[in-house]
């Protein structure tokens, strides 16, 4: 019973994150149509969004209302869940790598990254970029942890609630 409550809380925590990723996917889509390499980012962000709302549907239908679900919902959850796990694992590794850098290495990294950007406004300082990078890394660490724990519980629940996907 406690695992169900944790799963519900994690599902509701993922909703604003999924909305953010969905919004970013929509913002990148026009650019991605001109640059096909960006379509991968749109695909990944869309998968996280689809996974979250498929899981929400599973929670509201199968767990809360104890009703049967369409068998395709299970496929949507599994496929988008696998992609979300891979993405969350990459986010986790990147955020840990950024947060584990020693201050001198971190400052060198930020300075070199800023040198590659020729048209930055003068008020964008290395300290500001470093601070934003750390905040982003912390956000991605929290987000990836939530996604990884949620998908782990979700896959357990897909087996436990397999009867809700059976058609009569």
Image (spheres, grey):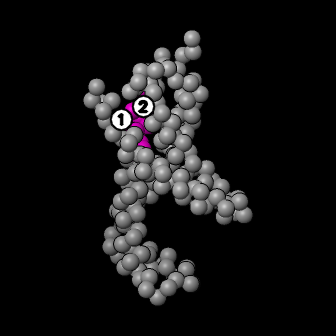
Which residue in the structure is indicated by mark 1?
Answer: 7
Where residue 122 appears, as percent x and y from the top left, is 46, 88
**Residue at 35 percent of width and 35 percent of height:** 7
Q: Residue furthest front?
A: 65
* Residue 35 at least partly seen: yes
Q: Dot 1: few (<14), some (14–19), or many (≥20) neighbours within 10 Å?
A: many
> Magenta span has 152?
yes
Q: Is 90 or 12 nearer to us in this picture?
A: 12
* Apparent side of residue 33 relative to residue 143 in the rendered image (left or right): right
Residue 16 in the image: above or below residue 9:
below
Where residue 138 appears, as percent x and y from the top left, is 36, 59
Q: Kindly report the secondary structure that dominates the magenta region of the rendered protein.
A: helix
**Element assignment for label 1:** helix
> Magenta span has 17?
no
- Circle nearer the N terminus (2, 1): 1
**Element assignment for label 2:** helix
**Residue at 65 percent of width and 55 percent of height:** 39
Which residue in the structure is indicated by mark 2?
Answer: 59
Q: Is 127 or 23 nearer to us in this picture?
A: 23
Where residue 76 appears, as percent x and y from the top left, is 57, 34
**Residue at 44 percent of width and 74 percent of height:** 109
* Residue 93 at least partly seen: no
Q: Quadrant of the C terminus?
A: top right
Question: Which segment is the magenta one?
Answer: 146-157
User: Residue 130's image quarter?
Assistant: bottom left
């Amino acid at each position: 019973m406690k695992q169900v409550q944790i799963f519900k809380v994690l599902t509701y925590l993922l909703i604003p994150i999924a909305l953010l990723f969905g919004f970013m996917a929509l913002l990148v889509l026009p650019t991605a149509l001109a640059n096909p390499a960006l379509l991968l980012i749109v695909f990944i962000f869309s998968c996280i969004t689809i996974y979250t709302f498929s899981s929400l549907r599973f929670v509201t239908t199968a767990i809360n209302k104890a009703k049967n679900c369409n068998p395709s919902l299970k496929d949507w959850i599994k496929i988008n869940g696998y992609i979300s796990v891979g993405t969350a694992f990459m986010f986790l590794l990147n955020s840990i790598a950024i947060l584990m850098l020693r201050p001198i290495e971190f400052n060198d990294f930020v300075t070199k990254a800023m040198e590659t950007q020729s048209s930055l406004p003068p008020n964008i300082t290395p300290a500001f970029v470093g601070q934003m990078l750390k905040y982003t890394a912390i956000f991605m660490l929290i987000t990836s942890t939530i996604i990884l724990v949620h998908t782990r519980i979700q896959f357990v629940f897909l087996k436990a609630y397999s009867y809700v996907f059976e058609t009569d």
